[in-house]
Image: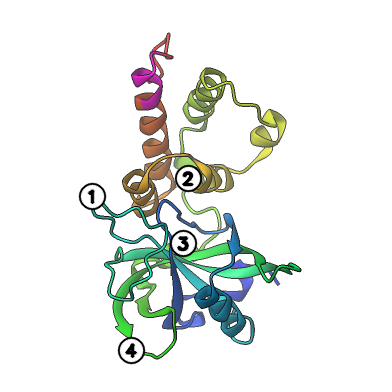
Amino acid sequence: MTLTERYRRPADLPSRIPVFPLRGAILLPRATLPLNIFEPRYLEMIDGVMSGARIIGILQPIVSGDDDQESPVEKTAGLRSVGCAGRVTSYQELDDGRLIITLTGITRFQCVGEAETEMPYRIMSVSYDKFASDLTEGLGEELVDRQNLLRVLKTYLEANRLKTDWATIQRASNEFLINALSVMCPYGPEEKQALLEAKDLRSRAEVLVALAEIDLASNGSSGTTLQ
């Protein structure tokens, strides 16, 4: 059963989920995020979710100017209000006690409160209603300017001397391409959050293009107009 078949409406997902606050990381519907789990609090969290709904929320912390923590230790640390729920779709235990897991995105959520628990990790009350359209695979793909996205992507890769399997990119659906690029792109927390909160695929593609063009212009790598 695919995730789209398993989760057809917001009511199919739990209203309280454990969250993994992680700076500079986002998840999006049907995209994947590999995670290396080694902190005791998150090892305990994974043990819990694997015996339950197998769902975790990826949520960025609110970073202050002097805070360089990737994942805040304090349960009082501020968190963004919008994140994305994912299901553990790959799980591997290593000899040194670490876990290697893969999350596959289901839908974005809005935080509506936090549960007070004695667990070392945080559990949020969430609402998926605002993002119910995330549960429809491929919604809005036909509105994406794919030609422009691919042109800018190719220029960005060449300017940064990055190699990729271009044939695979050409075959990818608009949704997969846009969401996977958004999860993998090397931008900062604010840019990542803008990609996460874009209202639809076309808007997210436009943000990706704008970020790439800014990067190209700032590095003097853009020899042509990419609009």
Q: Which residue is mark 4?
A: 116
Residue 25 placement, left or right of 50:
left
Residue 168 placement, left or right of 67:
right
Quick check: marks 3 and 2 in contact, CB under 8 Å? no
Q: Earlier in the sequence, mark 2 or mark 1?
A: 1
Q: Residue at x 68, y 71 (%)?
A: 97
Tell me, for residue 128, which label it has, or none. Answer: none
For marks 4 and 2, give the one nearer the viewer.
4
Q: Earlier in the sequence, mark 4 or mark 3?
A: 4
42 up-or-down from 170: above or below = below
Q: Is residue 125 magenta?
A: no
Foreground of the two, 147 or 104: 104
CA–CA distance between discs 2 and 1?
A: 24 Å
Q: Is residue 8 visible?
A: no
Foreground of the two, 171 or 38: 38
CA–CA distance between discs 4 and 3?
A: 29 Å
Mark 2 burial class by Cα count in 10 Å: few <14, some 14-19, many 20+: many
Quick check: marks 2 and 1 in contact, CB under 8 Å? no
Q: Which amino acid does the dot numbered 4 rest on?
A: Glu
The magenta-colored residue range is 215-220
Q: Earlier in the sequence, mark 3 or mark 2?
A: 3
SS for tag 4? loop
For marks 1 and 4, give the one nearer the viewer.
1
Q: Which residue is mark 3?
A: 134
Q: Which residue is mark 1?
A: 65
Tell me, for residue 182, which label it has, or none. Answer: 2
Q: Which amino acid does the dot numbered 2 rest on?
A: Ser
Q: Residue at x 34, y 26 (%)?
A: 214
Percent across and percent down for residue 190 are 31, 47
